[in-house]
Image (tube, rainbow, N blue to C red):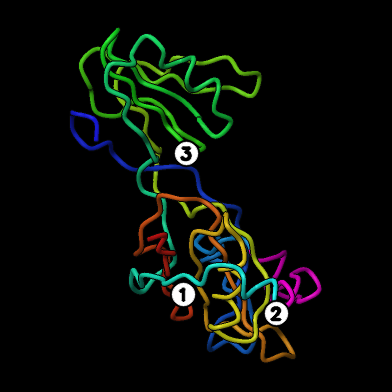
């Protein structure tokens, strides 16, 4: 863990989506559209969301079955960017980030310490750490200096998301087990129209916490790796 204060939270919102009211007989609650991660143009249109695919039985059995931490009521939420500290690597910090495809930026204290950031959508303006700046990697591989201080998210946001429809909680969890890049899942009690299937939210980005948007009794379940 690098020295200095904890960075503040924040980040861009996910894509907006309309959702059904639990008491509205399928009517959309437009005032809450921005609070739910995108399931489809409308979560009542099952053609827009594929059924959750699980590898064949013997293939799936060879994969590790994970345990999951229940982080409580509410969807998963990114509050702080993921970082790794490299003491004594200040001079090589930019070079190290450039060699890692998943590195999104860096902060360095001259020739001393290096922080690499691994979360998309980071900005500057975080807590000051010695003389470090927040350098954000651009699409062309160059870097933009966002000024003094750690990198941060502008505001909390949902993690990257994949959505499919599942028969039940166990089905949704098996799908996450079968995907190495899946870091957790949520299963709102929201049924696909004319079906008993539910919407399975697969969180495909590490570093999230719980206590995100509360809707349809969804919990944030985070995959344990050891």
Looking at the figure, which quarter contains the C terminus? bottom left
Q: Which residue is mark 3?
A: 119
Q: Residue at x 68, y 83 (%)?
A: 192
Q: Residues within 10 Å of mark 3 (few under 14, many from 20)?
A: many
Dot 3 falls on a residue whose secondary structure is: loop
Decide whether residue 40 is among the magenta residues.
yes
Q: CA distance from mark 2 to mark 1?
A: 33 Å
Q: Which residue is mark 2?
A: 57
Quadrant position of residue 202: bottom right
| Residue 69 place in picture, x, y as percent | 36, 70
Dot 2 falls on a residue whose secondary structure is: helix
Position of 100 compared to 60: left or right?
A: left
Q: Residues within 10 Å of mark 2 (few under 14, many from 20)?
A: few
Q: Is residue 184 above or below residue 136?
A: below
Q: Is residue 134 above or below residue 194?
A: above
Q: Residue at x 74, y 76 (%)?
A: 56
| Residue 104 place in picture, x, y as percent | 50, 30
- Give the magenta part as a residue range: 39-56
Decide whether residue 4 is among the magenta residues.
no
What secondary structure predominates along the stretch shown in magenta? loop
Q: Which residue is mark 1?
A: 215
Q: Residue at x 41, y 56 (%)?
A: 77
Q: Is residue 132 above or below residue 61?
A: above
């Amino acid at each position: 863990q690098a020295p200095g204060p904890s960075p503040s939270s924040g980040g861009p919102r996910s894509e907006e989506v309309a959702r059904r009211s639990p008491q509205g007989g399928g009517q959309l609650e437009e005032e809450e559209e921005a609070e739910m991660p995108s399931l489809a143009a409308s979560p009542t249109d099952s053609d827009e969301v594929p059924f959750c695919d699980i590898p064949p039985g013997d293939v799936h059995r060879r994969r590790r079955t994970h345990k999951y931490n229940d982080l409580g009521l509410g969807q998963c939420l990114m509050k702080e960017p993921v970082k790794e500290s490299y003491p004594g690597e200040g001079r090589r910090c930019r070079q190290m980030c450039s060699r890692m495809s998943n590195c999104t930026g860096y902060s360095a204290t001259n020739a001393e310490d290096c922080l690499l950031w691994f979360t998309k959508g980071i900005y500057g303006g975080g807590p000051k750490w010695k003389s470090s700046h927040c350098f954000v990697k651009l699409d062309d591989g160059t870097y933009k200096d966002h000024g003094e201080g750690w990198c941060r998210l502008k505001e909390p946001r949902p993690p990257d998301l994949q959505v499919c429809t599942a028969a039940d909680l166990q089905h949704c969890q098996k799908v996450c087990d079968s995907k190495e890049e899946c870091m957790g899942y949520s299963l709102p009690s929201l049924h696909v129209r004319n079906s008993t299937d539910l919407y399975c939210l697969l969180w495909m980005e590490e570093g999230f916490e719980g206590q995100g948007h509360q809707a349809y009794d969804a919990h944030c379940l985070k995959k344990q790796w050891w």
